Image (cartoon, rainbow, N blue to C red):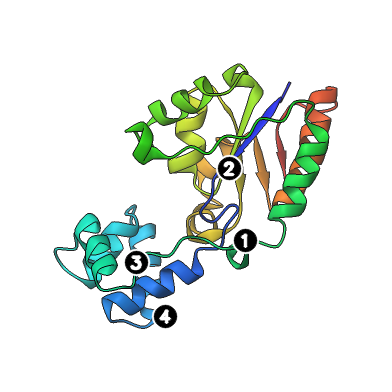
Amino acid sequence: MIRAVVLDVGECLVDEGRRYAAWADWLGVSPHTFSAVLGAVLAAGGGFDEACAVIRPGFDAAAERAARAEAGVPEETYTEADLYPDARPALSALRGLLAEETELVAASGEWGVAKPDPAFFRRLAGALPFAPGEILHVGDSWAYDVGPAAEAGLRTALVRRGPWAVLDWESEEARTLPGFRIGGLLELSGLILNANAGAGTGDGEA
């Protein structure tokens, strides 16, 4: 039985395109160049900070964020305009489906542990009044979301959006690790309803 759904923010609820464009401007390259470098680094198994270091050798994420703040162009917070179009409708559908509503915002900086450490997901599960196997975690990366969440005992869904998911969608890990593979968040409520009714095995693909 799935009693709670936890959704990743970046490239799950929120389109990070504006954030990437701002970093491109800060690093002195075009958004196209930044995206191309980011894609190449992701394909090689790296991450956002590694991509920035390709563009600016010696890149230090904390120092650069402090420099941006001092220069009056801090890393922007997300706004309503950054939400994917299906984010709010999907959240509304999930609230209507799950009997008990619990809201939690998990911040790795406050917890002192970050993805992809499974300890982050164990801490997440411990903060909710449900067993790990009753919690569905939805993310856009099998390496940072699906794999460690499953290791912590949570159920998982991989959404095909953002560079990580698109690059890895046909990989063995992305095909076999998630309980659900979805093309958008609006698919979640129907899959959960079927899983909870015992109509399926809990596995599905869109």
Q: Earlier in the sequence, mark 4 or mark 2?
A: 4
Q: Earlier in the sequence, mark 3 or mark 4?
A: 4
Q: Please tell me whether mark 3 sits on a helix, a strand or a loop.
A: loop
Residue at the (56%, 26%) spot, across then down: 154
Lateral position of residue 199 relative to residue 70, left or right = right
Quarter of the figure with residue 22: bottom left
Task: Read off the residue under disc 3.
Answer: 74
Q: Are marks 4 and 2 in contact (CB under 8 Å)?
A: no
* In the image, residue 35 above or below residue 138: below
Label 4 residue SS: helix
Mark 2 vs 1: CB contact within 8 A:
no
Which residue occupies 61% across, 68% down? 81
Give how far across and how far down residue 6 sits, in percent. 60, 36
Q: Quadrant of residue 175?
A: top right
Crowding around mark 1 (Cα neighbors within 10 Å: few <14, some 14 to 19, many 20+) is some
Q: Residues within 10 Å of mark 2 (few under 14, many from 20)?
A: some
- Tag 4 residue: 32
User: Is the residue 171 above or below the residue 27 in the image?
Assistant: above
In terms of sequence position, does the residue under pointer 4 or pointer 1 come before the other?
4
The amino acid at mark 3 is: Pro
Q: Where is residue 4 drawn, in percent x and y? A: 67, 29
* Pointer 1 residue: 83
Nearest to viewer (mark 4 / mark 1): 1
User: In the rendering, at what x and y percent does residue 169 appear?
Assistant: 56, 52
Q: Which residue is mark 2?
A: 175
- Between discs 2 and 1, the one toward the N terminus: 1
Mark 2–mark 3 CB contact (< 8 Å): no
> Could you tell me which residue is drawn at 77 percent across and 33 percent down?
192
Of the pair 37 and 170, the residue shown nearer to us:
37
Q: Amino acid at mark 1?
A: Leu
What is the x, y in percent for residue 106? 48, 37
Identity of the amino acid at label 2?
Arg
